[in-house]
């Protein structure tokens, strides 16, 4: 019987509901550079890692305006308003239940680690996590390298880790570090994109508590 000992969480779109803000900010930039704006669904269809490629797909020309400028403008706009975001429903209840069942938890994010720490503190979540793993810049290249580093230094058996994210990149990361993954369908990618990964999906974070390997730990507490 599969029994998990550690849950690895994505942050943006999985724990924090910030897709709407990302759409608002990227549309402000698209308007500034005279490019077509995106609907929520169009954003979900195009967003991906590395974000530099996603910016090109939606119309930015880095020969005219370098990615470093556009990327910094996006982050500055996001920083100004990120405190308007809320957690997805049931986040604290789920985190508390998992902790009470004796599992450890960490966050793996493509966000700048300073911002990740600020967000976790804003929502008073620090007590639930052993480690907050983020990048040392705001250009969101991806999470594979930092995920490998986490598994190596933590000494956690990958077979006992469950990773929960909201993008196909999260699935790619999970496969690179040989951990199980469940994808949340109310984040930054459409359900149709997530279905292509061929892994379990949930539409509510409360359903994490019913996942085999988690549910058994809760019953045994």
Image (cartoon, grey):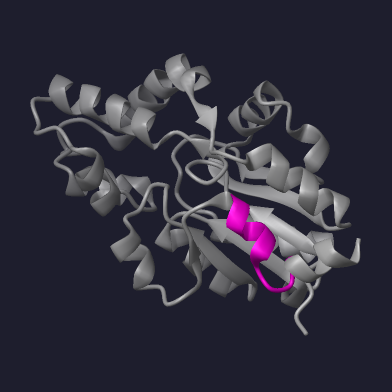
Q: Where is residue 153 in the image (x, y as percent from the top left)?
A: 81, 60
Residue placed furthest toward the top: 80
Q: Is residue 80 magenta?
A: no
Q: Where is residue 65 in the image (x, y as percent from the top left)?
A: 20, 30
| Depicted 33 relative to depicted 143: above or below | above
| Depicted 25 relative to depicted 143: above or below | above
Q: Where is residue 145 in the image (x, y as percent from the top left)?
A: 59, 59
Q: Position of residue 60 (x, y in %)?
A: 17, 38
| Depicted 104 relative to depicted 58: above or below | below
Q: Does the magenta stretch include residue 210?
A: yes
56 and 183: which is toward the camera: 183
Q: In this view, does 98 lie to the left or right of 50?
A: right
Say which quadrant the N terminus sits in.
bottom right
Say which quadrant the C terminus sits in.
bottom right
* Total marks in image: 0
| Depicted 127 relative to depicted 45: above or below | above
65 and 175: which is toward the camera: 175
Q: Let me know if residue 147 appears in the view.
A: no
Q: Let me know if residue 100 appears in the view.
A: yes
Residue placed furthest toward the front: 219
88 and 32: which is toward the camera: 88
98 and 124: which is toward the camera: 98
Q: Is residue 39 left or right of residue 92?
A: left
Q: Is residue 61 left or right of residue 44?
A: left
- Give the magenta range: 206-214
């Amino acid at each position: 019987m599969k029994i998990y000992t550690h849950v690895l969480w994505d942050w943006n779109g999985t724990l924090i509901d910030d897709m709407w803000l990302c759409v608002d900010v990227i549309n402000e930039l698209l308007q500034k550079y005279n490019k077509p704006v995106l609907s929520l669904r169009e954003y979900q269809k195009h967003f991906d890692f590395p974000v530099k490629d996603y910016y090109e797909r939606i119309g930015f020309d880095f020969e005219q305006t370098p990615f470093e400028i556009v990327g910094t403008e996006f982050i500055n706009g996001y920083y100004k308003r990120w405190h308007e975001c809320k957690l997805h429903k049931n986040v604290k209840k789920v985190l508390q239940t998992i902790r009470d069942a004796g599992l450890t938890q960490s966050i793996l994010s493509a966000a700048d680690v300073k911002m990740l720490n600020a967000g976790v503190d804003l929502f008073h979540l620090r007590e639930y996590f052993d480690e907050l793993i983020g990048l040392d810049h705001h250009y969101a290249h991806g999470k594979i390298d930092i995920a490998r580093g986490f598994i190596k230094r933590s000494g956690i058996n990958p077979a006992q880790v469950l990773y929960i994210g909201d993008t196909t990149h999260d699935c790619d990361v999970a496969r690179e570090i040989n951990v199980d993954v469940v994808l949340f369908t109310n984040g930054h990618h459409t359900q149709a994109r997530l279905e292509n990964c061929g892994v379990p999906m949930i539409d509510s974070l409360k359903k994490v508590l019913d996942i085999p390997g988690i549910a058994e730990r809760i019953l045994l507490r």
